[in-house]
Image (cartoon, grey):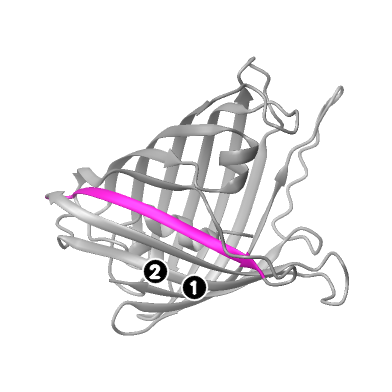
Amino acid sequence: MRLMFATVLMLISVGVAHAQSTLQQNLTAKKPPTYSGNLSLGYNTNLYNPDTYSSESSISGDLTFNYRVKDANLIRAYLGGYKETTQGQEWKPNDGFVGWVNNSFWTRGKKLTIGQQIRANLPYSKESRDRDTKLLGISVAPLVMATLTPSVMVIYLPQVIKNFHSYKQNRVGSANIEYTTSHTVVGIWSITDNIYIQPVAGYSQSWTYDGTRRNPGFSASGEIGYSFASGITWGAGWTNAGTFRRFENGTDQTFELFDNETSTVYTALYWVF
């Protein structure tokens, strides 16, 4: 709920023709401008009755800044935060990162592009810093982009993360996560020159410092958006995430793309500069 999928995914993308989601607009493949980035502001809510205790809503903001070193090589910095409007709490930061990005170090014509990102994940959030005693995370994320038709693109982003903590257990007695692997698949369909649809699916696994494997996680989202002039895009969609529960007789493989009790719906305004 704190960070919309579209906001996350625009950190990994390149530009193509036709309608452009924020994911596509973030930078061009061959030679981005010297300075570029994106800003997003959004409103998020679950689907419970607003008068009930389970109702949650928030506003969120995210900023990504890129500096092009040479060709398609970028230094990228990201920070974001949110405010829970149902609880009246203060703005809280999310974890951020700085890293090296090259989303087109290998291409095959106009159909296939392979890129790479290496990030230093910074524990800005209160949960990571105070509860989990996290010091740093290092992630390696290759990127594969395939243009199937002039209006359809598929992006695959695997990622490996190594975390560093002061202690193997956090301050509430749970084991901290040392390693995480994840797989994200994104589809982008440009319906017209201004309108796009963007489905996303993800799967992740993690391990504690003693090698215990946590329950695998899944995520799903979908967004429809409209691109205006001057790099401004409006989007609306939903996100859903959970875990595959592990039992003695196997793993519960139920996968819910949308669930009234766990999904979040959102609307957001993006500016790519």
**Which residue is most to the bottom?**
229
Q: Residue at the location (75% across, 33% down)?
A: 172
At 41% from the left and 51% from the top, the residue drawn is: 155
Residue 134 picture quarter: top right
Q: Principal SS element in the magenta part?
A: strand
Kind of element beneath mark 1: strand
Which residue, given by chain and number where applicable, does mark 1 sit on?
41
Q: Residue at x 59, y 47 (%)?
A: 126
Q: Amino acid at mark 2?
A: Leu
Q: Which residues are magenta?
A: 71-84
Question: On the image, numbered disc 2 is attached to which residue?
Answer: 39
Image quadrant of residue 64?
bottom left
- On whether residue 81 falls in the magenta region, the answer is yes
Q: Position of residue 163 (x, y in %)?
A: 50, 29
Residue 197 lies within the magenta run: no
Give the quarter of the figure containing the N terminus.
bottom right
**Image quadrant where residue 32 sits:** bottom left
Q: Amino acid at mark 1?
A: Leu
- The image shows residue 25, relative to residue 262, as above or below, that is below
State yes or no: discs 2 and 1 in contact (Cβ < 8 Å): yes
Left or right: residue 187 versus residue 64 is: right
